[in-house]
Amino acid sequence: MPDFQERFGQLHTSGKDAGQYYFSNVRSGLIVGLLSIGTLIGALVGGPLADLVGRKYSITFWCVIFCVGNIVQIAATDKWYQVMLGRLVAGFGVGALSLLVPMYMAETGPRHIRGALISCYQLFITFGIFLAACINYACYEHQRYKAASWRIPMGVGFIWAVILGVGILAFPETPRYEYRKGKTEHAKQTMMNVYGAPANHYSIHVELEEIEQKLRAEQVQGSALQEWYRMLFAPKMAHRILLGMGLQMFQQLTGANYFFYYGTVIFKGTGIDNSFVTQMILNGINFGTTFYGLYIVEHYGRRRSLIVGSTWMFIMFLIFASVGHFSLDRDQPDRTESAATAMIVMAAFFIFGFATTWGPMIWTICGELYPSRYRAKGMALSTASNWLWNFLLAFFTPFITGAIDFRYGYVFAGCNILGGLIVYFFVMEGQGRTLEELDTMYLSNVLPWKSSKWVAPPPEEINRIRKEAGTHDAMDVEDGINQAPINGGNHAHKDSYETGSLHQEKTDNDEVMPAPRAPETVVHKETTE
């Protein structure tokens, strides 16, 4: 926007561009990238705060912080560092919310739609990006030389912060958090509302029992520092923490933000007159195809979708980089219009692959990856990794593209292949699993490429696995949690779940409860760390 450049940019004093305003690589990198530093800090602080005051009240608090940062930016008149500091403060809120919102979804949503539900998080991110592109285009066309051209896009952010911050107060706290705080009846009522079923329904009975068993094994807790230590050295937790951080790193290294952050600059370099139009089209594709991603995540699974997505994005970036480097005339791009068109098409195909796989599904996997006791801290670290790499890419991209132009795409192509290999060798398939069941899979050393066919062992075998992992002392609290029904729960249910028999039972009020289907449903899936 010309007004933004004149207020916060630098003036060329010599050469063919004398008298024009521009942003140096350092200044543009700081303005774009400082948001990511704020998000990194917010993600790290947001987890412990959520453990202290709850998920939903934390969401409201960080929405307020975001609004404060937005006010600082909009109030700027001619100091570029005020915009930078405002983005830093707003980043605190964005980072914490990027952790807390998918956490709330993971801990509240029924398992049969949990993947699609968490993927909706990415869906609405893509909607926000698309809407921002449309608003930017409208402001560029109608308010190009006025302060409104950049203040309106910033001000729109208040709308969503207020909707989220106030709206979440009308929702219940997550049942897993309520259970940890001793509010068992509230937790049960929340699950009844979420499932739309009575308290004695099979799904509610089993999931509450799993939560209760797992949390009773977590009763012995020390200081906050001790909890961090225990998390890092608990069986298989270091592996999962590194995996979560690695997946978020590779989500950034897919190269999606190369287009989202610098798309207008990239396509301006191909000779397109109004690159805002191209950016709006690409963001529209990003938003529209994310709907398909909601279908994919629950029908084709996490692993297969991510591996196919990595391969697809690798091919698209390979073509994009090759055309940009070998075919496009950077000095006179009008002479190579077909090359510019091909690059836009490849970018669109790339975004299709990202929006349907790595965009939504990484947040789904990270929401499923950690046990309840360490979920807030684990997701804080993985989200912080996302924002750290977000900052690194945002800050260094102008320097790298200035040095190697479109060959930068080869770097992203290679990272996509590495990301696919990480998924193949280390990520468990979470389709149709409860969070507690996934926890057991990681403790049991299940081979990831065979995880979709894994059948949980009976409780005795689970005990043996945990004893070998060094967690049997915690499990044996109160005469063994395997024998502890929920709120006087029916032991007959426990017996039938363990045998996996395909029949129906009735509760005291004769309501039919469907028995589990073998081998998809597993009994007494609890985890202790």
Image: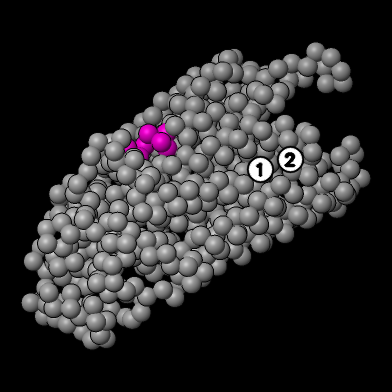
- Residue 25 percent coordinates (x, y): 70, 26
Q: Inspect the magenta stretch and tell me whether residue 412 lies in it.
A: no
Q: Nearer the viewer, residue 390 or 480?
A: 480
Q: How crowded is the residue under tag 2: few (<14 C-alpha within 10 Å), some, or many (20+)?
A: some
518 is higher (above) or lower (below) than 26: below
What segment is highlighted magenta in the picture? 42-49
Task: Say which quarter of the image contains residue 10.
Answer: top right
Badge number at residue 266? 2
At a point 88% along the width and 49% down the height, the residue shown is 327
Q: Earlier in the sequence, mark 1 or mark 2?
A: 1
Q: Which residue is rendered at x = 21% and y = 56% of the image?
A: 473
Identify the disc placed on residue 59.
none
Locate residue 516, reporting x and y percent.
28, 78
Q: Amino acid at mark 2?
A: Ile
Left or right for 36, reference 373? right
Q: Is residue 518 visible?
A: yes
Count the labels in the image.
2
What residue type is disc 1 on?
Tyr
Q: Nearer the viewer, residue 208 or 471?
A: 471
Is residue 159 visible from the viewing direction of this image? Answer: no
Q: Compared to 236, does 232 lie above or below? A: above
Residues at marks 1 and 2 touching, judged by CB atoms closer than 8 Å? yes
Mark identifier at residue 258? 1
Choose between 353 and 464: the one closer to the eye. 464
Residue 191 lies, in percent from the top left, at 23, 60
Q: Residue at left 20%, top 64%?
A: 209
Residue 93: percent from left, percent from top: 42, 34
Q: Secondary structure at mark 1?
A: helix
